[in-house]
Image: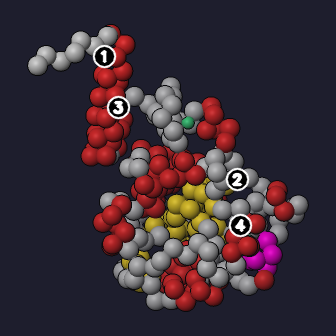
Amino acid sequence: MPYPARSAPERGAGLRRLVGRVAGQLRAAGGSVLDTLLPPQCLACTAPTVAQGLLCAECFRAITLIGPPMCACCGVPFASLGLAGDRMCPRCAEAPRAFARARAALLYTEGAKPVLLAFKHADRTINARPLARLMARAGAELLAECDLIAPVPLHRSRLLSRRYNQSALLASHLSRIALRPHLPDLLKRVRATPPLGDRSAAERAALLDGAIALRRPGRVAGRRVLLVDDVLTSGATAEACARVLRAAGAAAVDVLAAARVPLQRETRRE
Ligand SMILES: [Zn+2]
Ligand SMILES: [Zn+2]
C-alpha cells in the first residue's frame, strides 16, 4: 500500500525531528568531539547560540554569579543575609571547617539547575569547559595557590550509571587552565552513600564516616590540595574528603565548585 503523500511543511518537520534525534544520539554516544561538530546550543536549554559554551539570553538572566561579600571560609554570598565585610558566616564561625576555603561560580538557584543537571545527567560534557572557566574566575586565588587538583570521587556504582565523574571533568579543565597537576584518582569512594540532601549534619557525618579513602598517599604530604566538586550543598562530602587529605599531611585543602546552594536552604537542612 502506498504511503500517503506528505506536504512540504510536514516533510520539513520530519527532517528536523530526524536531525534532532541523530544529534541527540551523537551527543549521547560521542562526548566532546562530536559536540563541537554540532550546531552551538545554550548550556542549559536547546536554544541555538552563536558559539559553543554560552547561555542563551533567557538562561543567562536566570543565573546568579557569586561575588563578594561572602564568607571568608565557605564562600557563601552574604547578599541575601544582610551581612557584609570580610568575615565568616554563622556556620563557619560556630565550628571550624576541615577545608580552608570553598568557592563556587554560581548560586544553585532554579535558574542554575538546568545548567548543572544537563551536565550531570544529560551527557552534556561540553558544559565542562565553560563551567570550568567560570570556576577559574571565582576561585582564581585558590587555583594560583594550589599544588595539585583532585575531584571529589564518585562511587563505582554511580560512575557506571552516569558514565563519567562530572567533578573529574571540571578538575581536568581547571588543571589545564591553571597549569597544575590533576590527580583524578587521588581519592576513592569506598562506600556508596545515599543522597545527603535533607539529613541533619550529624546524620551526614555518620553516613560519610569511612566512605572516602586516599589512593595515593605519597602525593599529599605538605601539599596544598584543591578539591573540585560540581555542586556544594552542605559541604559535608567536601569536608569528609578534606579530613582524609589533612590526615595524610596535606598542608591545606581548598574546595572549588561549579555551584553552591544558598545559605538559607543549607541552614534549614542543618
Ligand atoms: Zn538557554
Ligand atoms: Zn561560611
- Residue at the left extreme? 1
Left or right of 41: which side holds 163?
Answer: left
In the rendered structure, does residue 75 fall within the stretch colored magenta? Answer: no
The residue tagged 4 is 265
Residue 270 x %, y %: 70, 78
* Above or below, 92 relative to 263: below
**Amino acid type, mark 1:** Arg
Q: Which residue is disc 2 drawn over?
A: 66
Earlier-in-chain disc, 3 versus 2: 3
Instruction: Indicate which disc, 3 or 1, sits on the residue closer to the N terminus.
Output: 1
Q: Position of residue 102 (x, y in %)?
A: 64, 67
Q: Residue 190 in the image: state x and y as whole percent.
A: 38, 82
Quote the CA–CA distance across marks 3 and 2.
34 Å
* Magenta stretch, residue numbers: 89-93
Q: CA distance from mark 3 to mark 4?
A: 37 Å
Camera-side mark, 4 or 1:
1
Q: Nearer the viewer, mark 3 or mark 2?
A: 3
View extreme (front): residue: 1
Instruction: Confirm whether residue 242 shows in the render.
Output: no
Count residues near mark 4 (Cα–Cα under 10 Å), then give few for <14, some for 14-19, many for 20+.
Answer: few
Tell me how far mark 3 sits from mark 1, CA to CA. Answer: 14 Å
Seen at 51% across and 73% down, the residue is 195
Q: Could you give the CA–CA distance between mark 1 and mark 2, rounded to whole angstroms? A: 46 Å
Residue 67 visible in rendering: yes
